[in-house]
Amino acid sequence: GIPSNPNDSVITFLLFTELLPFPVSLAELSLMNKLIHTSLVESQQHVEILQRDPNSPLFSIKTFEELPLKKELLQGVYMMGFNRPSKIQEQALPLMLAYPPQNLIAQSQSGTGKTAAFVLAMLSRADASKKYPQCLCLAPTYELALQIGQVVRTIGKFCTDIKVNYAVRGNRVLKGTVLEEQIIIGTPGTTLDWCFKQRILDLTKISLFVLDEADIMIDMQGLSCQSIRIHRALPKSCQVLLFSATYKEPVRAFAERIIPDPIVIKLREEELTLSNIRQYFMVCQSMDEQYRALCNLYSSFIIGQVMIFCQTRRLADWLAGKMSQDGHQVAILTAELTVVQRASVIQRFREGKEKVLIATNVCARGIDVQQVTTVVNFGLPVDLDGEPDYETYLHRIGRAGRFGHRGIAFSVVQADNVRLVHKIEEYFREHPH
Ligand code: ADP
């Protein structure tokens, strides 16, 4: 039977009243991943190339030296510490830098080297002797635009005559301003304003147009329409490059409106797998017992770092407080932190400054912390009907087993939730991953 420990009613209450998560927008998630990915995300997948035009043979490169890059840019690449092109860059860079210029759609997950690739293309195409905008890059948000600018500044460190300006809110320009920067990075709204209202940005002189994060653009009201309006005013000869982390139907439809007969380079996302993860379930009678089970696990089984997932923020806060009182170094990731704070929490964890990271699923969705091989579910993820949330379960623990790692997942659950354990077991037996 279910014991009548007062804590039980508390946890039941917590689990079923705070299920509506704080939404973390795709743009925020993308920014967070950019701040976190200070090194390349390696992939075991093959690059797929679609709609290959038989008249333009494609080739790939294995070194940066094979590319038609000026020496200042190669210096920039070396300074960044890039030894060799990433998988997506091997295929995309020769195309992006080819003559005559080619249009391209490239899709790969965050951290695989897309930004570095198109930044190289912009710096390569920009003619420093001409003092007007030639490359235009659109990003969904202010923060993402600035982030790209940061990459331009670092890779372009030795291209001292190439300048950047930002068409973003808050960057006020007067009518009649003459833009001398070769590269403009902006959000669609302000860029439109600069083109058609302020009339300071002449789109007819743009020879390279980059659309970054197309999937986020179409997710955010109005941005895709604004991008299309900008695109329409570009000269026919303008090279167009479009990037996206995903390539589902709406993204595809949007992308093909902008680039009608595209070459598409895709790097499939690393699959989440349960096949090399051992899953253990522990059934406890109360929340205190759940906590003791967790501490026992921690002191006896867990070597290295662990990520602990809680269904709600309140539970995560409670657990973090309790573990800190007991002398553990814990970090906590919840939605009330700003994006930059969240990125910094993850960054510290990646550097090993904390051994335990407690997170709610909303916050942890889509975030890569590659070195964690032990995951604890402090309570199982459930949906609004109180049924197991299989996808979240897979996302929480599947990361522990990526790149051939062997992972362990512990789920510490209350006795009245044993049926969830059985359902999870059954589900993944029928839908193996
Ligand atoms: P994406 O745009 O796909 O998210 P980025 O271009 O931002 O990926 O690259 C992710 C991280 O990997 C960045 O820190 C970047 O400096 C680094 N990086 C990019 N290309 C390479 C490369 N060829 N070699 C090593 N590191 C790279």
Image (tube, rainbow, N blue to C red):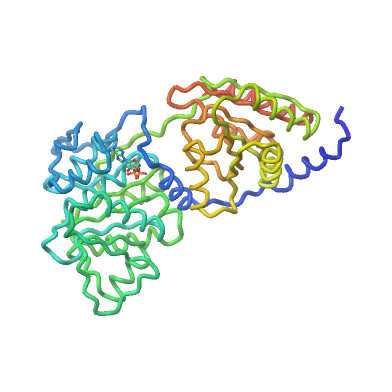
Choose top left, top right, bottom left or bottom right for residue 149: bottom left
Residue at 48% in and 48% down: 29
Q: Is residue 200 above or below residue 134?
A: below
Q: Position of residue 61 (x, y in %)?
A: 19, 33
Q: Check the picture and name the quadrant holding the N terminus.
A: top right
The front one of 242 and 405 is 405
Number of labels in the image equals 0
Direction from residue 65 to residue 173 in the image, left or right: right
Q: Position of residue 34 (x, y in %)?
A: 40, 47
Direction from residue 222 to residue 68 in the image, left or right: left
Residue that sits furthest to the right in the current view: 4
Direction from residue 344 to residue 233 in the image, left or right: left
Residue at 28% in and 64% down: 165
The front one of 356 and 284 is 356
Residue at 48% in and 29% down: 272
Direction from residue 55 to residue 137 in the image, left or right: right
Q: Is residue 19 above or below residue 381?
A: below
Residue that sits furthest to the bottom in the current view: 175
Q: Is residue 48 above or below residue 138?
A: above
Q: Position of residue 25 (x, y in %)?
A: 51, 52
Q: Is residue 1 above or below residue 193?
A: above
- Specify the quarter for ligand 1: top left
Residue at 53% in and 23% down: 407
Q: Position of residue 198 (x, y in %)?
A: 29, 76
